[in-house]
Image (cartoon, rainbow, N blue to C red):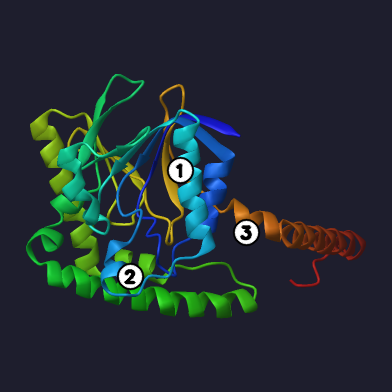
């Protein structure tokens, strides 16, 4: 088990069919920390409103893992997001469950002595704040893309190819999507600079990143729908984005190792032929 000082996860979207709950449960099982930050959109309340909740046993396992962290003494901070905004009305009353606290935003003080704002990020998204109906429309469009992506990758898997993210491709290639990410990152970084924060830790846009923007350290922990990533603070103060693919990697390890053995044998035979004939047969 790997021990971290702090772990930040967001955009899990428990209750949706595309949530990688089993991978997250595996991640929480194999890692531990002094502080666990749930940086919004852990439970997808929008799907509850739309009567499209897809709750599985794996989703319950994630909740149990989180409560297990709290029970063992880990401080758990739940920062509400736009998909789990149903929690926000309880915040003024100081609602908490043992070591699990709920808030809109909070401060994290790193080993490096710097002060970080921890917030989901939807407040810095003009579409979410001003045009809620566009957000719902975008959410539905994202569901369609994920459905296409799932079927497309099923075909790729059958053909022996690895995973490829359609939505990530679109985010990087479609100009409006790139502009949206750029504006979001700059909006939230500018706010932190005005308020005297050294950095910001957020989620919301499903785009894991660690970089400096105008003197402010911008860190996004990604999501557990596609990226399957978490932001971690090591005991010595180092920051890192961890991408967790171990559960299905372990299952496929035998196939991967076997493939490597076959490739090594093929390479050895090729070298033997080359040494015998003095020329590569493929040249």
- Name which quarter of the figure residue 230 lies in: top left
Which one is closest to the eye, mark 1 or mark 3? Answer: 1
Screen quadrant of the N terminus? top right
In screen coordinates, is 99 left or right of 259?
A: left
From the image, tell me which residue sits under label 1: 66
Q: Residue at x 27, y 56 (%)?
A: 84
Which one is closest to the eye, mark 1 or mark 2? Answer: 1
Q: Mark 2 or mark 3, which is nearer the start of the sequence?
A: 2
Disc sitting over residue 248 in the figure: 3
Q: Secondary structure at mark 1?
A: helix
In screen coordinates, is 63 left or right of 171?
A: right
From the image, tell me which residue sits under label 2: 170
125 in relation to 236, above or below: below
Number of marks present in the image shown: 3
Q: Secondary structure at mark 3?
A: helix
Categorize mark 1 by other alpha carbons within 10 Å: few (<14), some (14-19), many (20+): some
Q: Is the Cβ of the residue at disc 1 closer than 8 Å to that at disc 3?
A: no
Structural distance between the alpha carbons of marks 1 and 2: 33 Å
Query: 49 or 225: which is nearer to us?
Result: 49
Q: Mark 3 or mark 1, which is nearer the start of the sequence?
A: 1
- Name which quarter of the figure residue 205 lies in: bottom left
72 in relation to 255, above or below: above
Q: Residue at x 54, y 37 (%)?
A: 31
Query: 47 or 35: which is nearer to us?
Result: 47
């Amino acid at each position: 088990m790997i021990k971290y000082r702090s772990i930040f996860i967001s955009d899990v979207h428990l209750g949706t069919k595309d949530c990688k709950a089993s991978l997250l449960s595996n991640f929480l099982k194999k890692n531990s920390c002094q502080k666990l930050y749930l940086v919004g959109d852990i439970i997808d309340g929008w799907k509850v409103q739309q009567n499209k909740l897809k709750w599985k046993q794996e989703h319950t396992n994630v909740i149990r893992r989180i409560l297990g962290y709290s029970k063992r003494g880990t401080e758990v901070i739940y920062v509400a997001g736009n998909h789990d905004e149903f929690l926000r009305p309880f915040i003024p009353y100081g609602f908490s469950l043992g070591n699990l606290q709920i808030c809109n935003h909070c401060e994290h003080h790193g080993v490096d002595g710097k002060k970080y704002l921890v917030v989901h990020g939807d407040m810095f998204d003009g579409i979410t704040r001003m045009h809620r109906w566009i957000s719902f429309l975008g959410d539905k469009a994202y569901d369609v893309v994920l459905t296409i992506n799932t079927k497309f990758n099923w075909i790729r898997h059958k053909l022996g190819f690895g995973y490829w993210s359609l939505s990530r491709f679109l985010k990087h290639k479609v100009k409006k999507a790139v502009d949206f990410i750029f504006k979001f990152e700059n909006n939230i970084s500018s706010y932190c600079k005005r308020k005297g924060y050294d950095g910001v830790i957020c989620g919301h846009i499903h785009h894991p990143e660690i970089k400096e923007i105008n003197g402010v350290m911008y860190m996004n922990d990604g999501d557990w729908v596609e990226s399957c990533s978490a932001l971690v603070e090591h005991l010595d103060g180092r920051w890192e984005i961890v991408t967790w693919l171990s559960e299905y990697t372990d299952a496929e390890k035998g196939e991967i190792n076997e493939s490597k053995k076959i490739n090594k044998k093929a390479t050895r035979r090729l070298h033997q032929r080359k040494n015998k004939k003095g020329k590569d047969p493929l040249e």
